[in-house]
Amino acid sequence: MIPSLINGELSIIGRLVDASNATLLCELTTGDDQPFKVIYKPGAGERPLWDFPEGNLAGREVAAFQLSEDLGLSVIPETVLREGPFGIGSVQRWIEIDESIDLSTLASSTSPEIRDIAFLDILLNNTDRKFGHLLPLEDGRILGCDHGLTFHTEDKLRTVLWQFANEPITPQEEKSLRTLGETLDPERYIGLISEEEFAAFLMRAERLLSTGLFPMPSEDWPAVPWPPF
């Protein structure tokens, strides 16, 4: 059984210095289980952004994980909101990646795993899908991380995964969109994103279902994050 992220003691063992906000590598000790690594992003360590409300990026990380699970995609490592050494923040299970994989080559592929992430990003309105936010595992799975800049009410999709633009959605993607009302529990998103942001997400899902096509890059908003890594 995989130990839970909710309980146990967080001990800081390092920091990811390339991250824009405080991103701490921790060991989580739970009862008799062996300590395991997690990423802890305290709300207190978030730098203010002009276009996102202050102090709630951690909640968006958790909401993104929940949506990935609700859609049956499971492309985001387990993520929870909990107390830590510097207060409330997101805690995400650490993922060991296959470092032999070139991320820019991976991001340009049309594999089903990459498509799942691109599909999820549309619904999340992910404004920061970089090459370095892809996590290739040795078993062939591909996960995504860093979902703090998501769920904005305005269209802000900014990603390195544009290879599916204007392509029709698949039958499975259509089914996922049509059954959202059955798979989603709105109460699970309360306190993570606002009611307006949740409503905007539902509108994006309806629009994607209505058009039946992956969106094209916007002419009014940068299509790729900078730097792309």
Image (cartoon, grey):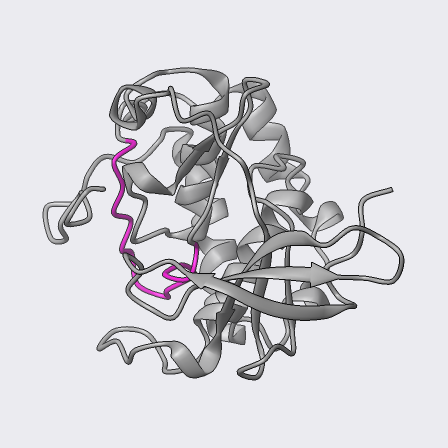
Q: Residue at x 27, y 23 (%)?
A: 163
- The reply to whether residue 126 is visible in this rendering is yes
Expressed as whole percent of the image width and height from the top left, the position of residue 147 reads 43, 55
Expressed as whole percent of the image width and height from the top left, the position of residue 177 reads 58, 38
Of residues 41 and 99, the one nearer the viewer is 99
Of residues 209 and 26, the one nearer the viewer is 26
Q: Residue at x 49, y 18 (%)?
A: 112
- Please say if 209 is above or below 4: above
Expressed as whole percent of the image width and height from the top left, the position of residue 9 reads 72, 71
Q: Quadrant of residue 80?
A: bottom right
Q: Quadrant of the N terminus?
A: top right
Residue 155 in the magenta stretch? The answer is: yes
Q: Quadrant of the C terminus?
A: top left
Of residues 96 and 140, the one nearer the viewer is 96
Residue 206 is left or right of residue 157, and the answer is right
- Please say if 78 is above or below 72: below
Q: Which residues are magenta?
A: 147-161
Q: Residue at x 43, y 15 (%)?
A: 111
